[in-house]
Amino acid sequence: MGGGKRGLAGPLFLACGGRLWCSARLESNRDKRGQSRTPYAGFWIRTGAYIIDSIILYIVQMVIAGVFGLGAGATTALDPAAQEAVLTGGGGLLILLMIVIGVAYFAVMESGPWQATLGKKALGLIVTDLNGNRISLARAIGRYFGKFLSSIILLIGFIMVAFTEKKQGLHDMLASTLVVKGQPGQFASRGVFE
């Protein structure tokens, strides 16, 4: 296949009928019975990764609360007096800072070279788009805010991971992402910036 589209004439491009957005790379990874061989990350391993991430973010929150002169109860609602101090004092800034840190942690780590937060990395998981490629920062931010929707419907958006074919939660479906067991680049058909 000659011509100026040399990089586009590979098997993925042809398998997709000329479309770059299809998921032929991961979809073609099926055994003889049609079962997917892609190692999608299930509910419990993802829960374990989230617990690790929560511990890390909790430690960061405690350090920042200490810098603001507040104790551990101020960020966990254990101390009503500390909660009142947060809401009446400079707590608005503290709350905003905590949200920004959470967004930055998840979005930057999942869209970065590791394709994983520290919790996911520890358990050998990565976040990809439907083609197995690294996700963009914008998609990672969208995925993060999609978790709020997954949460407010009685956590059903997270529980969906246990029951969907590709082990996707609602936030994964909204952002067109997958969480798989593997290393960065293992499933990629092309890079984010290629």
Image (cartoon, rainbow, N blue to C red):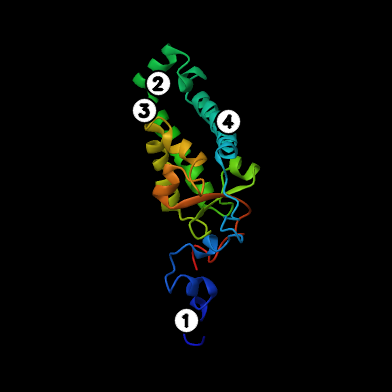
Position in image of residue 71 (x %, y %): 51, 18
Farthest residue toward the bottom? Answer: 2
Instruction: Return the residue at label 3.
Output: 92
**Residue that badge 4 annotates:** 55
Q: Are marks 4 and 1 in contact (CB under 8 Å)?
A: no
Asked whether disc 3 touches disc 4, contact meaning CB atoms under 8 Å apart, the reply is: no
Residue placed under numbered mark 1 in the picture:
5
> Which of marks 2 and 4 precedes in the sequence?
4
Give the residue displayed 46% in from the left and 55% down from the top: 136
Which quadrant of the view contains residue 149?
A: top left
- When the figure is inspected, residue 77 is found, relative to residue 150, above or below; the finding is above
What separation in Å lies between label 3 and label 2 (alpha carbons)? 7 Å
Callout 1: helix, strand or loop?
A: loop
Q: Earlier in the sequence, mark 3 or mark 2?
A: 2
x%, y% of residue 105?
Answer: 51, 42
Q: Which mark is residue 86?
A: 2
- Horizontally, residue 183 falls left or right of residue 10, namely right
Determine whether label 3 and label 2 are within 8 Å by CB: no
Above or below for 187 versus 152: below
- The residue lying at 54 percent from left, 53 percent from top is 112
Q: Residues within 10 Å of mark 4 (few under 14, many from 20)?
A: few
Please indicate, yes or no, whether residue 141 appears anywhere in the rendered image.
Answer: no
Q: Which of 127 and 180 lies nearest the eye of the viewer?
A: 180
> Separation of disc 1 and disc 3 at Cα?
53 Å
Q: Secondary structure at mark 2?
A: helix
Q: CA distance from mark 4 to mark 2?
A: 21 Å
Amino acid type at image mark 1? Lys
Kindly indicate whether the residue at mark 3 contacts the one at mark 1 (C-beta within 8 angstroms).
no
